[in-house]
Amino acid sequence: MNSGNLFSSVPAGLTEEFFETLTEGQGQLKIERIVSSQQLRPADKWYDQTSTEWVAILIGSAELEFKGETRSTVTLTAGDWLEIPPHTKHRVKSVDKNIDTVWLAIHWES
């Protein structure tokens, strides 16, 4: 049995997004905590994942940008969630300027 707190042990002074795997199944399911500060992925670097990703903002806010989509940006605040299909190129365009943004992300193979 594993347990923890999603809001504790957030590293200070981050220079890039922080990813922490909380649990994962046999290659089919991964649950992770992501912490984003003002560090952002460069404009020419996009996430292009082979799995479906479901994300929820627990604290803070973020604006996601999608490459080649009709709905090119989505703003999420605490409590909002979004499902991102496989191979949907995306990046974090901006995050809350006042506090670290804490995400919960669930990945699974479709």
Image (tube, helix red, strand yellow):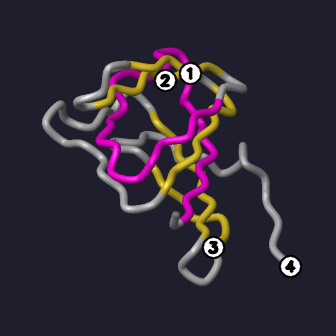
Frontmost residue, 27 versus 39: 27
Helix, strand or loop for disc 1: strand
Residue 65 vs 10, above or below: the answer is above
* Label number found at residue 62: 2
* Label number found at residue 24: 3
Q: Label 4 crowding class (10 Å Cα cut-off): few <14, some 14-19, many 20+?
A: few
The residue wearing badge 4 is 1
Amino acid type at image mark 2: Ala
Q: Residue furthest bottom?
A: 26
Amino acid type at image mark 4: Met
Answer with mark 3 or mark 4, whichever residue precedes in sequence: 4
Q: Quadrant of the N terminus?
A: bottom right
Helix, strand or loop for disc 3: strand
Helix, strand or loop for disc 2: strand
Q: Residue furthest right?
A: 1
Residue 96 vs 36, above or below: the answer is above
Residue 24 vs 12, above or below: the answer is below
* Label number found at residue 76: 1
Q: Label 3 crowding class (10 Å Cα cut-off): few <14, some 14-19, many 20+?
A: some
Answer with mark 3 or mark 1, whichever residue precedes in sequence: 3
Span shown in magenta: 81-108
